[in-house]
Amino acid sequence: MTRPDTPRRPSRAGRPSRVRRISQQPAFLLHQYAWSESSAMLELFTQDFGRISAVAKGAKRPTSSFRAVLLPLQYLRIDYSQPDEAESPICTIRGVEWAGGYAMPRQDALLAGMYLNELLMRLLVRGEKHTRLFGAFAATVRVLASQPDAMLEPLLRAFELVLLRELGLLPDLSVQTLSAQALDPRARYALLPEVGLHLAPAHGHALRGTQWLQLQQALQSDAALAGCMEVLGSHATDLKHQIRAALAHYLGGDLQTQRLMRGVRML
């Protein structure tokens, strides 16, 4: 819920400064670091406002109520104030509460969640709304907290597809990208950076046309994450190297968590 703008004291330029107060906004904490001796800077992914940066004043004090709830991979509801964008992009946290729903992921699932947090940190532009992506991320965290590790690879690949799709970085998976020719359901196709979807050689990582068509249909549905997981099943490994190359192209290299997880042969 957003309250009407309220005037604040005049700025140095002589015009009144305004602030918007946001209440009970669903959010996930992506990252935090020290802002001052007692305060922390937060990077948050919110349902209605996308990625935001916010100061949590006093959050580092032992008595702060923020300390127990400002945890990654937990569904939060936050109250914050947002100043005039022309003055500062930094928001101020007024309140945080744990919205509940699931426990903290553990072991390999926790590492996978940290990887997704870093992926969002690198690819999301501050202030761009991604409501569908927020829903997919919430569903992904829920699975990480409750499902066996065998689900990790199809889950990660499915979220990566949804992420690329929502950011406009994934081509139409129902046609060959360069020629716009329809896919042959029986032929094998590979997804390459800058080239898109194209006919794959006899050897190498690829999916059959029927699987790409099913993924395209799943991505267009309201249950994109679950649909992609169902299509991938045992084929997630075949997609892994293709998605990794696409992400590296847009990121300009590997993520820190990717290198860590590759060491334990997860990604």
Image (cartoon, helix red, strand yellow):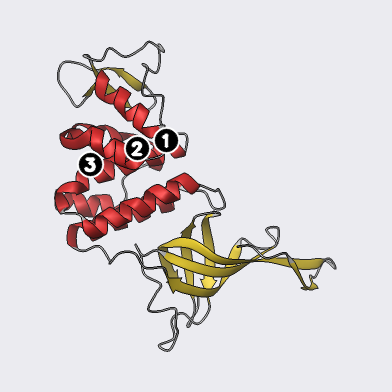
Rounded to the nearest angstrom, the CA distance separating label 2 from label 1 is: 6 Å
Q: Tags 3 and 1 in contact by the CB under 8 Å rule?
A: no
Q: Position of residue 195 (x, y in %)?
A: 37, 22
Q: Which quarter of the picture shows residue 79? A: bottom right
Instruction: Give the secondary structure at mark 2.
Output: helix
Per the image, the residue denoted by label 2 is 161
- Residue at x 26% of width, y 50% of height: 258
Q: Quadrant of the C terminus?
A: top left
Instruction: Give the secondary structure at mark 3.
Output: helix
For marks 3 and 1, the one nearer the N-term is 3
Query: What amino acid does circle 3 point to?
Result: Pro
Horizontal side of 231 relative to 63 (left or right) equals left
Per the image, the residue denoted by label 3 is 154
Horizontal side of 47 relative to 3 (left or right) equals left
Depicted 138 relative to depicted 77: above or below: above
Q: Is residue 59 visible?
A: yes
Rounded to the nearest angstrom, the CA distance separating label 3 from label 2 is: 11 Å
